[in-house]
């Protein structure tokens, strides 16, 4: 296999993995919406620092085990958390 062919094959794999990541993001946001609806019904706050810290600790532990860059992983986690909170805020606003 030539290097050019190998690069093309790896790019296809990267594309597939990237699209899988977005599928998982969609699933995560659907779960966030469900939590947002439950929180809205219960009058609970959107943010829960203890839950976020626990998840952060788990992400850091996974990074250490897998050799992933912690800064990248924490930045990605922050994006995921912020989007989840945005979705939940939208649900609460729509009920006012």
Image (cartoon, helix red, strand yellow):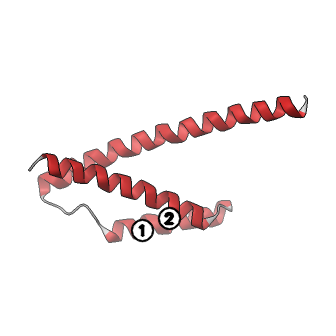
Quadrant location of the N terminus in the rendered image? top right
- The quadrant in which residue 4 appears is top right
Mark 2 lies on a secondary structure that is helix
Q: Is residue 42 above or below residue 53?
A: above
Q: Residue at x 35, y 66 (%)?
A: 51
In this rendering, position of residue 69 left or right of residue 22: right
Estimate how packed mark 2 is, as few (under 14), some (14 to 19) or many (20 or more) residues with alpha carbons within 10 Å: few
Q: Is residue 10 above or below residue 51?
A: above
Residue holding disc 1:
54
Residue 41 location (% of width, % of height): 12, 51
In this rendering, position of residue 79 left or right of residue 10: left
Q: Residue at x 58, y 39 (%)?
A: 18
Residue 3 location (% of width, % of height): 88, 34
Residue 90 location (% of width, % of height): 23, 49
Measured in 3D between alpha carbons, the distance from the residue under mark 1 to the one under mark 2, in whole angstroms, is 6 Å
Residue 52 location (% of width, % of height): 38, 66
Q: Do the residues labelled 1 and 2 touch (CB within 8 Å)?
A: yes
Q: Which residue is drawn at 28% across and 45% down?
A: 33
- The quadrant in which residue 7 appears is top right
Foreground pick, 58 / 85: 85
Mark 1 lies on a secondary structure that is helix
Q: In this view, does 10 lie above or below 35?
A: above
Foreground pick, 15 / 55: 15
Q: Which residue is drawn at 41% across and 70% down?
A: 53
In this rendering, position of residue 1 left or right of residue 71: right
Residue holding disc 2:
58
């Amino acid at each position: 296999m030539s290097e050019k062919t190998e690069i093309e094959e790896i790019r296809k794999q990267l594309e597939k993995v990237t699209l899988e990541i977005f599928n998982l993001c969609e699933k995560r946001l659907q779960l966030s919406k469900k939590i947002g609806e439950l929180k809205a019904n219960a009058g609970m706050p959107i943010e829960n620092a203890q839950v976020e810290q626990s998840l952060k600790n788990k992400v850091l532990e996974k990074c250490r085990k897998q050799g992933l860059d912690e800064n990248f992983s924490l930045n990605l986690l922050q994006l995921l958390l912020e989007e989840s909170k945005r979705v939940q805020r939208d649900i609460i606003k729509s009920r006012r």
